[in-house]
Image: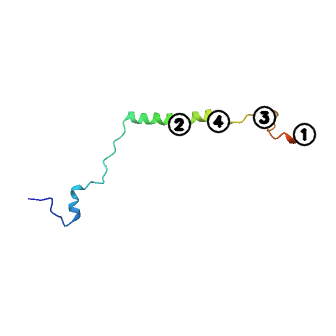
Amino acid sequence: MDRREESVPFAFTAESERFRSNVTPPRVRPTGSQIAGRVLLGLVVVAGLIGSLLLGIPALETPDAPGGRPDGPTAAEGR
């Protein structure tokens, strides 16, 4: 008769029932549809960044001043 409630002099034998391996199982390879979905998501993100640049850069440009001179203070022009 083997009783589990008895004290064990070695800690590693008492913990052997709860031992879990640190070896990980092999990774599951993604299917073709998962790969296609990831590629499509990446293309959508890249297209969004490029689109925001194409729409945002013209909005950040300053219009050219008439006459080719930059706008400046006009108080000193009359001197």
Which quadrant would residue 20 be assigned to in this image?
Answer: bottom left
Query: Residue drawn at (23%, 64%), measured in percent from left and top?
Result: 11
Pair 4/2: label in front: 4
Residue identifier under label 3: 65
Residue 78 marker: 1
Say what amino acid the circle numbered 2 marks. Val
Front-lying residue, 40 or 13 = 13
Say what amino acid the circle numbered 4 marks. Ile
Image check: 51 left or right of 70? left
Say what secondary structure mark 2 lies in. Answer: helix
Q: What is the quadrant of the N terminus in the image?
A: bottom left
Residue identifier under label 2: 46
Say what amino acid the circle numbered 1 marks. Gly
Say what amino acid the circle numbered 3 marks. Ala
Residue 33: x %, y % from top left: 39, 33
Residue 13: x %, y % from top left: 20, 62
Query: Residue drawn at (90%, 39%), measured in percent from left and top?
Result: 78
Residue identifier under label 4: 57
Residue 6 marker: none
Disc nearer the start of the sequence (4/2): 2
21 lies above or below 75:
below
Image check: 11 left or right of 28? left
Disc nearer the start of the sequence (3/2): 2
